[in-house]
Amino acid sequence: MTTHKGSCHCGAVRFEIDAPAAIEAARCNCSICSMTGFLHLFVAHKHFRLLQGEEAITTYTFNTGVAKHLFCKHCGIKSFYVPRSHPDGYSVNVLCLDPATIESVTETPFDGRNWEQNIAELSPLSD
């Protein structure tokens, strides 16, 4: 495991995660992910640490309300969120991680437009 640091665009929200240096990420085509270009890396709660900016985070929910989309209220970037698929962890946007600790990124497409039919294909949380 490697410790990766990440942040929103303005730097108000900073975090770190423990994950492999060779990242396996999911590229989802659901409405919100395709509009924002979010590239998912799923991590367990124990592998995520918010370093600063809790007061700068605002939450958006839609559809079932299970996913908690967490945005920086200053710059609008969603660096991580609590996904409906993994409510016991986080989905971190690989694009918000410092590239210095990333060895490689392998993207796997996920058909989020048909979420219910495809959820079993999604990667489990790294433990």
Image: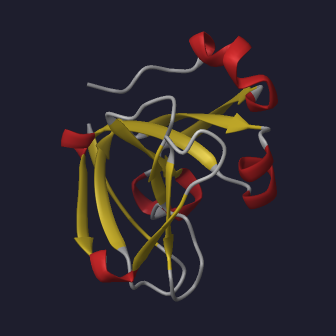
Looking at the image, which residue is at 81% across and 31% down? 113
Q: Residue furthest left?
A: 46
Q: Nearer the viewer, residue 106 or 25?
A: 25
Q: Is residue 53 above or below residue 25?
A: below
Looking at the image, which residue is at 54% across and 53% down? 93
From the top left corner, tell me how far across and down residue 27 is, in percent.
Answer: 70, 37
Looking at the image, which residue is at 42% across and 84% down? 11
From the top left corner, tell me how far across and down residue 45 is, in percent.
Answer: 25, 41
Looking at the image, which residue is at 72% across and 37% down? 28
Relative horizontal placement of residue 89, taking residue 26 as reference (left or right): left
Relative horizontal placement of residue 74, taking residue 13 as reference (left or right): right
Q: Nearer the viewer, residue 19 or 22?
A: 19
Quadrant where the C terminus sits is top left
Instruction: Answer with the quarter of the image where residue 95 lies.
Output: bottom right
From the top left corner, tell me how far across and down residue 19 is, in percent.
Answer: 33, 39
From the top left corner, tell me how far across and down residue 8 is, in percent.
Answer: 49, 74
